[in-house]
Image (cartoon, rainbow, N blue to C red):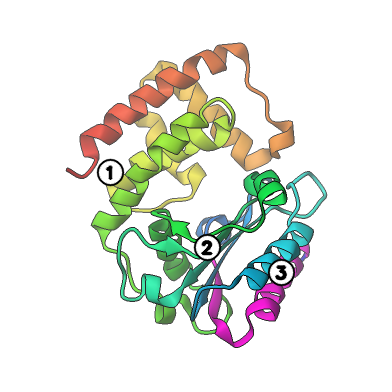
Amino acid sequence: MRDLAQVREVVRLVERVLGPEVVGVCAHGSGVLGGLRPASDLDVLAVTRRRMNGPERRALLDGLLAVSGPGAPGGPRAVELTVVVHSEVRPWRFPPTADFLYGEWLREEFTAGGPPAPRPMPDLALLVTTARAGAHPLSGPPPARVLDPVPPADLARACVAALPELLAELHDDTRNAVLTLARVWTKLATGEIRPKDAAADWALPRLPPGLRPVLEHARELYLTRHYSEETWSAELTARVRPYADAVLAEIDRLRPG
C-alpha cells in the first residue's frame, strides 16, 4: 500500500506540473516485469505533448526531491521518472530523446546543478518495451495506445549502448552491474526482456562454474537485501571482473553487426 501511495503521489505531481500536456503515465521496470524487490525503484514513464519549459522542470524536480527516497529499509522507495515527448517515440526512432530523467543516483547532481535537460537516451527502447508489455497505465490510455513498438534491432542496440556505463560501475554498483550484464546477455540470446533474477537463472548454467558464485550472490542480494545491506567478500570481489569479461565475450558474440 505504501508503494502504491507513493506512485500515486508521483502521478499527481506530473499532472499538477504539466496539466493537459500529459498524454499518459505508466509503470515499467521491476514493477511490471516480476514484482518489486527490496531495493527496486518505482519506475514511471510519462509521455507529454511538448517539451517542458524551465519553470516546469524546476517544479517537477523539486517535487521529486521531496517524494523520492534513498530506498532504505522502512522508508520511501527511490523514484525513477522518465518524461518523453510523444513525437520522440511515435513514430519510433533510435536513439530517442528523453525530455527529463530523474533518478536517486543523480540527486546530488541535480541539487548542485539544477533540473535535467533533454538528452539522447537509448535506454528508452527498453522502457517503452516493458511499459507496453506490462500494460499498467497510471493515468491516461493503455501504453500500447500511446507508444509504438520498438523493433528488435533497436532493443539490441540499446542493450549494447549501456555496456560502457555498466563497466564503469562494476565496483561501485556491483550488484546492479553484475545482474544487468546477465540481463543484456539474456536479451541478445533469447530476444526476451526478463526480470533480473530470471535473467540470472538463464545465465547461471551457461557460465563457467568458477564464476557462478558472483551471479548467484548478486541474485540473492537482489531478492532479499536493500543496498545498505549489501556485502561482497574479498573472494567474490576478485571474481567480479573475470565474470564481466566472460559475459562480455558472450555478448560480443551475439551483438548486432
Vertically, is 112 above or below 219? Answer: below
CB atoms of marks 2 and 1 within 8 Å: no
Residue neighbourhood size for the residue with mark 2, other residues' Cα within 10 Å, grouped as few (<14), some (14–19), many (≥20): many
Magenta-span inclusion, residue 173? no
Residue 13 sits in quarter: bottom right
Give, as a three-letter code, the residue at label 2: His
Label 2 and label 3: CA atoms lie apart by 23 Å
Indicate which disc, 2 or 3, sits on the residue closer to the N terminus: 2
Q: Residues within 10 Å of mark 3 (few under 14, many from 20)?
A: some
What main secondary structure does the magenta stretch of the protein show?
helix
Residue 148 in sight in this render: yes
On the image, the x and y values in percent for residue 133 come to 43, 67
Q: Which residue is mark 3?
A: 59
Residue contact at pointers 1 and 3, CB within 8 angstroms: no
Identity of the residue drawn at 28% across and 43% down: 189
Mark in the foreground, 2 or 3 = 3
Q: Is residue 1 left or right of residue 156?
A: right
- Circles 2 and 3: CB distance less than 8 Å? no
Rounded to the nearest angstrom, the CA distance separating label 1 from label 3 is: 42 Å
Could you say where residue 62 lies in the image, as x and y percent from the top left? 74, 63
Q: Which residue is mark 1?
A: 189
Q: Position of residue 217 (x, y in %)?
A: 57, 28
Could you tell me how far apart the alpha carbons at marks 2 and 1 are, in whole angstroms?
22 Å
Quadrant housing residue 18: bottom right
Numbered range of the magenta stretch = 2-28
Q: Residue at x 73, y 32 (%)?
A: 229
1 or 3: mark nearer the eye: 3
**Residue 130, image x, y percentages:** 44, 62
- Of badges 2 and 1, the one in the foreground is 2
What residue sits right under mark 2 in the picture? 28
Is residue 75 positioned above or below 235 on the image? below
| SS type, badge 2 | loop
